[in-house]
Image: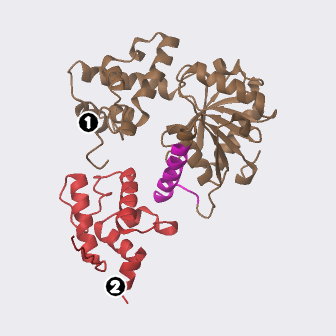
Chain colours: A red, B brown
Amino acid sequence: MTEQTTTTSPLTAEAVESALTEYLTDKTKTEIKPEDDVFASGLVSSMFAMQLVVHLESTYDIAIIGPELKLDNFRTARVMAELVLRLSENGADSHV
Amino acid sequence: MSTEPGAHRLAVVGGGVMGTNIAALAIGHGVPVVLVEVSEEVLAESKQTVAFKLRHAQLTGKLPAGRTPAKLVTSLSLEDAAEATTVIEAVTEIAETKIEVLREVSRIVRPGTLLISNTSCIPIDEMAAAVARPEELVGVHFMNPAYMIEMVEVIRGPRTGDDAMKAVTELLETLGRACLVVNDAPGFVINRVLHPLINSAALLVQNGVAPVEVVDGLLEGCLGHSTGPLRTADLIGLDNLVDSLNVLYERTGDESCRPCDLMLDLVRAGKHGRKTGEGFYDYRKVAS
């Protein structure tokens, strides 16, 4: 018999930003910094932005709808991390 | 008709790339849509695709502010197009298939219902011969993605009536599209120019004159094309492109419209472009 423990650590902007920077670097095959605008650099298309939407929703269990669904929320890993924190209950709790 | 979204009820026949594009465009502009397809499985997939495209349109700021998206209804029966004010056929680019759909739907809808073929190459008058009221049929060549590109090519067939032209103009205005009207001919304007260009570009790759990236790079860098012909081909879908080239070749005899072996090989290998993840380019690994 094995014992399993689950720990849920609250989301932090740094952790999300780091994970997203890594994700973008992997997908674009280009070194991406947290503040790099991936659309302005021409590295990705608006169709890839939809992949980012789906990725964030499935990874962080959030729903990006209404006025939050706009390209400006997906330009950089830092801005996306802020979005995730805003929409995530876990992240919201961490600010309490 | 009018330019008020509530005055329109759209039926879209065919839930492929263009059918789902047009459905997303319409509901995003507040025009309700009945989407008709042939199987439950395809319908379920089409419904998901429309939802995805609607989000893409919103994400990129292509929907009018303050307009609530309209309802999408899916159906397996053309009979559910009966109450539509406009029917848009967006089935495979094969004349017989389009003619059959238009023939059937024109018998179901009331007189005065605008019939649109979203053909990219087939002359409107070939299809007009089959419908109950030829004056109600007009061609509208939406671009892909229809919700991103504002301009459309409208084709007035020799038998298209003034009322249909007025109705199509009002519908397109409601959908936020601008249009330019052309006369009827195989491929109209856009694809009579674009398809032979793509085929010639592919032939240059086939003959080893230059690789894919170089052909596109030259047309982009030297001629200012925002997207090279081969990347454009991948977006259109190479299977659809071969169908359209065949339509053009059969009707014009122009050798530059006969699909080249490289394109046929890619289609046979299931490499249809962006939608299958691979065509002239490989989209599976990198962000694009």
How far, Cα to Cα, is label 2 from label 1? 49 Å
Picture residue at 57% right of the left edge, 28% below the top: B119
Disc 1 is attached to a residue of which chain? B
- Callout 1: SS: helix
Image quadrant occupied by the N terminus of chain B? top right
Letter of the chain that mark 2 sits on in the rendering: A
Q: Main secondary structure of the magenta part?
A: helix
Q: Could you tell me the amino acid type at mark 2?
A: Ser
Choose between B205 and A91: the one closer to the eye: A91
Residue A60 occupies which quadrant of the picture? Answer: bottom left
Q: Is residue B166 above or below residue A47?
A: above
Foreground mark, 2 or 1? 2
Dot 2 crowding, Cα within 10 Å, few <14, some 14–19, many 20+: few
Q: Which residues are magenta?
A: B44-64
Residue found at the far right of this picture: B111
Q: Which residue is mark 1?
A: B217
x then y, percent, for residue B228: 33, 35
Task: Say which element carries label 2.
Answer: helix
Q: Looking at the picture, tell me which residue is in the foreground, B40 or B183.
A: B40
Q: Residue furthest front?
A: A1
**Dot 1 amino acid type:** Gly
- Viewer can see residue B128: yes
Answer few, some or many: residues within 10 Å of disc 1's Cα (few below 14, many 20 plus, some between 14 and 19): some
Instruction: Read off the residue under disc 2.
Output: A94
Q: Are marks 2 and 1 in contact (CB under 8 Å)?
A: no
Mark yes or no: residue B194 visible: no
Q: Residue at x 53, y 40 (%)?
A: B41
